[in-house]
Image: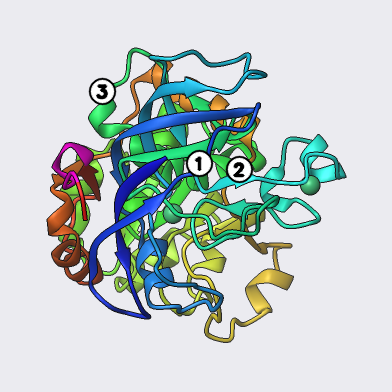
Amino acid sequence: MKTVGYAAYSQGSDLKPYAFERRELRENDVAIEILYCGVCHSDLHSVRNDWGGSTYPLVPGHEIIGRVTAVGSDVSRYQVGDTVGVGCMVDSCQHCDQCEAGEEQFCREGMTPTYSGQDRHTHEPTQGGYSRHVVVREEFVLSIPKSLDLSRVAPLLCAGITTYSPLKAWDVKPGTRVAVLGLGGLGHMAVKLAVAMGAVVTVVGRTDSKLEDAKALGAQHYLISSDEAAMAQAQSSFDLIIDTIPVKHDVTGYVPLMDVNGTLVIVGQVGLLEEPSTVPMIFGRRRIAGSLIGGIPETQEMLDFCGEHNVLPECEMIRMDEINDAYERMERSDVRYRFVIDMASMPESA
Ligand SMILES: [Zn+2]
Ligand SMILES: [Zn+2]
């Protein structure tokens, strides 16, 4: 199937129109016409090959919302016309212990990422959602609740599940005291989801510049990390800290904010941290942990939860040809809080 997307043709280059083929449907495949695609910081990291392994041309995009246009002969869960989503992965081995537990993101053989991966059968590069169409095996296609505003759902497929998964893994429920570090694409979702779960949510910021935003997103409290007195007073007052800060940083000052047995979960920074002191970890059995996306069952659970509680990201809609400017703005944190590409603006041909 011929399609068109926007690709980086080489490391760090601007994205430009790109004509390419999607595979013919296998028996278990779903063909999707893409309506919206969210813009994730990982897209930019991949374009620049910051994490290694990128291949070009590279079509980014792993927050995909679309409509089913065709299904393979063995597909049972979806029909033509259904509204569906695709997130950060499109395949896995399906038989290891992690896949069987519904944690395909930790597949022992490695999950297949939505872009910059390799198809498990043909070894062709996978290409992402900055395109008109995508073909994905049924098991990795998600159902979108009808109640949600489609133009805002896309970021749930990465930013949403990346923050939902640790909230569930650490058993957040009504009354749990949750702090959120960083208030970008991930952080604002962490706030909305934790609030919807009934948690008491505090946003921690360096200055008071995000105070109004934090309150508008539903956070009950705001803590200024440069205010030593306030930080001292907030010691031992959180059960869980979701750390969405996307760059190398020092967590030492945040660890004492956790109560005994508390956990600080890193979901933003992929790579090195500043050297943390073990003192507040030892004196309080506090942990520093990490978390990725969630598996497919948990991603569906998150979408259904958002449908029930009408939790949606704050989005700024852009045209496809605005993507390079959007990347520059994303780097300056000049977005509230997630760009979403309206795929109706994709050119008909490259
Ligand atoms: Zn992402
Ligand atoms: Zn597996």
Please give the name of the residue rendered at 64% of the width and 36% of the height, measured from the top-left corner. 171
Q: Quadrant of the N terminus?
A: top left
Q: Which residue is mark 2?
A: 294
**Real-space Cα separation, disc 2 to disc 1, in angstroms:** 6 Å
- Viewer-side residue, 92 vs 346: 346
User: Ligand 1 appears in which quadrant?
Assistant: bottom left
Residue 195, percent across and down? 40, 33
Residue 104, percent across and down? 70, 44
Beta carbon of the mark 1 residue lies under 8 A of ligand 1: no
Q: Which mark is residue 161?
A: 1
| Amino acid residing under circle 3 | Asp
Please give the name of the residue rendered at 43% of the width and 15% of the height, measured from the top-left corner. 80
Q: Is residue 174 visible?
A: no
> Taking 59 as reference, is 152 above or below it?
above
**Real-space Cα separation, disc 3 to disc 2, in angstroms:** 22 Å
> Taking 65 as reference, is 57 above or below it?
below
Sequence-first disc among 3 and 2? 3
Please, what secondary structure does the residue beneath circle 2 have?
loop
Q: Which residue is mark 3?
A: 149
Please give the name of the residue rendered at 13% of the width and 48% of the height, measured from the top-left corner. 319
- Viewer-side residue, 3 vs 209: 3
Q: Are marks 2 and 1 in contact (CB under 8 Å)?
A: yes
Please, what secondary structure does the residue beneath circle 3 have?
loop
Which residues fall within the magenta stretch? 343-348
| Amino acid residing under circle 1 | Ile
Label 3: few (<14), some or many (≥20) within 10 Å? few
